[in-house]
Image (spheres, rainbow, N blue to C red):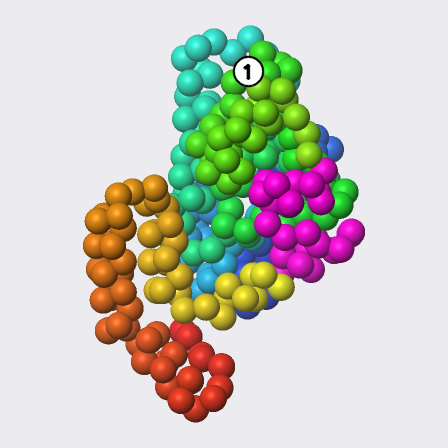
């Protein structure tokens, strides 16, 4: 059985589905490495415009598989965590937009995996939670980096130190997620967002992601980066197409 299912629900959209439904897609070393490989391949594929992450069986990801963690020593634990960091870097550094369709549970490392995406879609039945301390662990999967940037330091502190869970509507309101789908329609909403991303100018989108990833930085550094990135856009075919489409009163057709 493949640990990651790959399909193309829309042209240019690569959907990667974590496939351990009996374990709510809990992360083992093999699953983490399979997801990293699949994300890397999709990122390098010129035919892919958007990556969509989701989970099989009605749940996104229950976090780390505790059965695979028992008896783990410091050296093995460090290697395991670093393999998770590799996956998160692939997602966060990806030049293409990444959407997470989060149904059911997204817990611990699963929450970190979801929040690494550019857009996180949930519904009222989604639960995102941070139970690390309940099992005697600290946050991993870059959660200590991502969470304060998503929801602010104080809310991140409350989520992690109190091992809190958040249901979909509250989670989106507070910033753990971005879009609240109608109940049972997370996949459909996620595909709508993928379609929006698919129609965007790829170079401009990539450069914008790069600018946002570099924040926070000094004003001087931000302005210099803006000037450099915008200069690249000005001489691109995308900008020429955007201007032509505006003049002709039509939607741009970015390649």
Residue 58 visible (yes or no)? no
Q: Is 182 within the magenta?
A: yes
Position of residue 102 relative to residue 86, above or below, is: below
Q: From the image, which quarter does the C terminus lie in? A: bottom left
- Which of the pair 123/11 is nearer the observer? 123
Is 252 above or below relative to 213? below
State the image coordinates of residue 160 (x, y, percent, origin top left): 57, 24
Q: Nearer the viewer, residue 188 or 130?
A: 130
Left or right of 231 on screen, residue 20? right
Bounds of the magenta span? 167-191
Query: What residue is shown with label 1?
Result: 137
From the top left corner, tell me how far across and down residue 85 is, in percent: 42, 31
Q: Residue reaching furthest bottom?
A: 248
Tell me what residue is drawn at x 33 percent, y 52 percent.
211
Magenta region includes residue 56? no
Image quadrant for the N terminus?
top right
Seen from the viewer's position, the closer of residues 243 and 63 is 243
Q: Residue at x 49, y 81 (%)?
A: 251
Task: Point out residue 168 in the picture as x, y percentages from the top left corner.
Answer: 70, 42
- Regarding mark 1 in the picture, which secondary structure is present there? loop
Q: In the image, 221: left or right of 42?
A: left
Which residue occupies 25% across, 54% down? Answer: 223
Determine the residue positioned at 51% across, 46% down: 117
Q: With respect to residue 94, does 248 lie above or below?
A: below
């Amino acid at each position: 059985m493949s640990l990651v299912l790959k399909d193309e629900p829309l042209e240019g959209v690569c959907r990667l589905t974590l496939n351990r439904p009996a374990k709510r897609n809990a992360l083992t070393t093999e699953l983490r490495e399979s997801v990293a490989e699949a994300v890397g391949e999709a990122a390098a594929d010129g035919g892919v415009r958007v990556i969509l992450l989701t989970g099989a069986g009605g749940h996104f990801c229950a976090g780390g598989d505790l059965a695979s963690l028992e008896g783990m020593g410091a050296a093995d634990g460090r290697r395991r965590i670093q393999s998770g960091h590799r996956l998160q870097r692939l997602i966060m550094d990806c030049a293409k937009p990444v959407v997470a369709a989060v149904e059911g549970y997204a817990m611990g490392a699963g929450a970190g995996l979801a929040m690494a995406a550019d857009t996180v879609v949930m519904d009222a039945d989604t639960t995102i939670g941070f139970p690390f301390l309940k099992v005697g662990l600290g946050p991993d999967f870059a959660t200590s980096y991502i969470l304060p940037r998503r929801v602010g330091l104080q809310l991140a502190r409350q989520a992690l130190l109190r091992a809190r869970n958040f249901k979909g509507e509250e989670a989106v309101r507070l910033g753990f997620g971005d879009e609240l789908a109608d109940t049972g329609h997370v996949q459909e909403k996620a595909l709508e967002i993928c379609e929006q991303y698919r129609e965007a100018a790829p170079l401009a989108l990539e450069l914008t992601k790069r600018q946002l990833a570099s924040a926070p930085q000094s004003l001087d550094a931000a302005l210099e980066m803006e000037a450099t990135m915008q200069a690249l856009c000005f001489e691109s075919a995308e900008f020429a197409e955007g201007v032509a489409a505006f003049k002709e009163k039509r939607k741009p057709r970015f390649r």
